[in-house]
Amino acid sequence: MSDQIVAFSGGKDSTAMVLRMHELGEKFCCLFTRTGNELPEVYEHIHNVIARTGADIVYPDAPDLDFLIRQLRMIPNHRARWCTRMIKIRPCIEYLKAHPGSTLCIGLRADEEGRSGLEGSHCEYRYPLKEWGWGLEDVVDYCEAMGANVPRRTDCALCFDQRLIEWWHLWKEQPQMWTRGEQYEEMIGHTFRSDARDTWPASLKGLRERFEAGDKPTRSKLPTEGRCRVCTM
């Protein structure tokens, strides 16, 4: 196993980082922390990238979203984003502690000066995209040139932070996952969406009824920079 570990979410930044490092002949393994709530295309993309690079992939031990919702009797939200900490960050740290001397490669771009990755004395840190001076346009262009079909979403299917149009796509394309979300809301007595976020129903049941009636939200062009970087980069 390589001492150089790439934090791989399947998003455009980490995809570009993995493919370019492979192209440069670097040795590394990829680390992907599963939530158990990913959309199918995420795993398809990850498997394609791993097959293309020949890199090993590590899935650190972590509780999944379903287990934590039931155990904590709570749905994650903006004020209690325990999902990222408990499913993504903590398992990554535990893996790094168990492999001293590792270097973690994080996909932060050169145009993200205000952002930081995982911090602490668990390992050495490296930011290849920043080393190369790559911004968003460079990442997108490289992924396109390499024929990398990055999934539309790499966060949880039932992420509280997703846009309304993404909820509509989930209802349309993943009815089983949508039903699971409704069941969580009924069981916990709380909703994924905030009732102050917009004029649409906060509950998934209410949203479904609107969608079934033919209502479709407009495609929002709101930036995704406020969303969880661990899950989407």
Image (cartoon, rainbow, N blue to C red):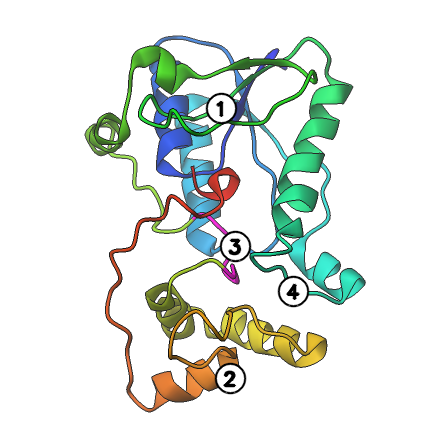
From the viewer's perspective, tell me whether residue 152 is left or right of residue 68: left
Disc 2 designates what residue? 205
On-image quarter of the C terminus:
top left
192 is higher (above) or lower (below) than 202? above
| Amino acid type at image mark 4 | Ile
40 is higher (above) or lower (below) than 90? below
Label 1, label 2: how far apart the Cα atoms are: 38 Å
Point out the tag, 1 or 2, that comes first from the N-terminus. 1
**Residue at 44% across / 81% down in the picture?**
201
Q: Are marks 1 and 2 in contact (CB under 8 Å)?
A: no
Label 2, label 4: how far apart the Cα atoms are: 16 Å
From the viewer's perspective, tell me whether residue 108 is left or right of residue 64: left
SS state under label 4:
loop
Q: Which residues are magenta?
A: 154-160
Q: Are marks 4 and 3 in contact (CB under 8 Å)?
A: no
From the viewer's perspective, tell me whether residue 159 is left or right of residue 168: right
Disc 1 designates what residue? 106
| Amino acid type at image mark 1 | Ile
SS state under label 2:
helix
Label 3, label 2: how far apart the Cα atoms are: 19 Å
Front disc: 4 or 3: 4
**Residue at 80% across / 61% down in the picture?**
71
Q: Are marks 1 and 4 in contact (CB under 8 Å)?
A: no
Disc 3 designates what residue? 156
Point out the tag, 3 or 2, that comes first from the N-terminus. 3
Point out the tag, 4 or 3, that comes first from the N-terminus. 4
